[in-house]
């Protein structure tokens, strides 16, 4: 018997040929359509990452098995234990193997896990790395020469550890056919819904998305919605005050000369201090601030695109659309609809 704080994962996720209540009731069970999906759990993983594929793929169309990368009950980052239904041998016979995430210190994966991933891939299974799950896939050599993505904050680390991988930090997910990777937490959900759409059809994916209260479909090439704020404290207090002043006046025009004067610096000194403190140029920083403000207005107001453009400092709806698409590969209107959903 497992102690009370151990969550038995196989009954939670596996379909076992039964029917769930909810949207899946609208689909006639057909064993010929059934895909066997193995989801890898490991000691220290976050429960949310594990729950994403379980929530999306649960039901009669898929047979889910949670497989432990280590023997015995596994302690989650939330402090409770889970008891996976099987070990890594559970990957044998799986049509799809999902690595929901990985340790955020990007530590090397155990050799036994890498071997299991390689064997599953070699016999034809689709291997999916959600969020930091791309790291074990890359270490196993499954992403060499491929385009892949991961959480934007770890993309540089992935490229550094595995230069053979073509890392694209901008997109939500990448489908290379036999290997699939996604960006951060929300993108892992987008990627899972995309795969559900691919395997079970748009209607079923839309039903599941509605149950989860998320947008039914975001294209993989759409940019990650990343808010990269300026560091909270600049190295020079005068510069920090100027940055805060500008953030409250994004609709206004700002010149380097005027801002340097406000900071009591020469233009050259201001430019040097600015790049040192923020890691970017003032022009790019201002554009990022305006884009972030436009995102917030699109998410929280019903103001027209023209009004949003004016309030965010773009001057016109055309200018906002051009900059928005260049940054996020999406239009302001499409972005608003996603958050409405």
Image: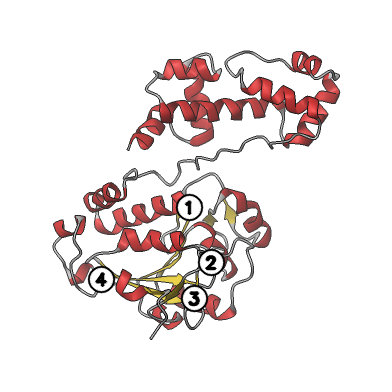
Residue that badge 2 annotates = 137
Is there any visible trace of residue 179 in the rendered image?
no
Question: Whole-percent x and y of residue 173?
Answer: 46, 51
**Mark found first going from the N terminus, 4 or 2:** 4
Q: Give the mark nearer the N terminus: 1 vs 4.
A: 4
Q: Which mark is residue 185?
A: 1
- Tag 3 or tag 4, which sits nearer the N-term? 4
Residue 15's disc number: 4
Say which residue label 3 marks.
74
Disc 3 versus disc 2: nearer the observer: 3
Identified at 16% across, 66% down, the residue is 29
Closer-to-camera residue (323/241): 241
Q: Is residue 255 above or below residue 41?
A: above
Query: How far, Cα to Cα, is label 1 from label 2?
Result: 17 Å
- State the residue lying farthest toward the bottom: 1
Q: What is the spatial separation of the Cα atoms under label 1 and label 4, in whole angstroms?
A: 25 Å
Q: Between disc 1 and disc 2, whose residue precedes?
A: 2
Marks 3 and 1 sit apart, C-alpha to C-alpha, by 21 Å
């Amino acid at each position: 018997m497992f102690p009370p704080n151990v969550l038995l994962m196989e009954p939670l996720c596996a379909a076992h040929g039964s029917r769930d209540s909810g949207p899946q009731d609208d689909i006639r069970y057909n064993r010929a359509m059934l895909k066997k999906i193995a989801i890898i759990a490991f000691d220290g993983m976050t429960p949310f990452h594990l729950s994403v594929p379980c929530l999306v793929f649960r039901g009669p169309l898929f047979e889910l098995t949670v497989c432990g990368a280590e023997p015995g009950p596994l302690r989650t980052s939330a402090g409770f234990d889970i008891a996976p239904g099987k070990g890594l041998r559970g990957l044998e016979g799986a049509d799809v193997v999902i690595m929901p995430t990985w340790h955020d210190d990007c530590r090397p994966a155990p050799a036994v896990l890498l071997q299991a991933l390689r064997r599953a891939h070699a016999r034809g299974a689709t291997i999916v790395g959600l969020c930091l799950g791309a790291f074990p896939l890359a270490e196993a050599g499954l992403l060499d020469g491929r385009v892949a993505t991961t959480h934007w904050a770890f993309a540089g680390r992935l490229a550094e550890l595995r230069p053979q991988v073509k890392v694209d930090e901008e997109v939500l997910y990448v489908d290379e056919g036999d290997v699939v990777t996604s960006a951060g937490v929300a993108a892992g959900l987008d990627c899972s819904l995309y795969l559900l759409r691919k395997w079970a059809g748009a209607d079923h994916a839309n039903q599941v998305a509605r149950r989860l209260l998320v947008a039914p479909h975001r294209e993989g090439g759409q940019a990650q919605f990343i808010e990269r704020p300026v560091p909270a404290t600049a190295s020079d207090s005068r510069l920090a005050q100027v940055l805060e002043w500008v953030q409250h006046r994004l609709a206004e025009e700002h010149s380097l000369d005027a801002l340097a004067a406000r900071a009591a610096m020469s233009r050259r000194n201001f430019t040097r201090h600015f790049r040192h403190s923020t890691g970017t140029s003032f022009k790019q920083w201002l554009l990022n601030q305006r884009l972030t403000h436009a995102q917030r207005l699109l998410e929280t107001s019903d103001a027209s695109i023209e009004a949003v453009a004016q309030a965010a400092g773009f001057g016109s709806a055309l200018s906002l659309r051009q900059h928005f698409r260049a940054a996020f590969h999406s239009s302001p209107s499409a972005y608003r609809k996603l958050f409405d959903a």
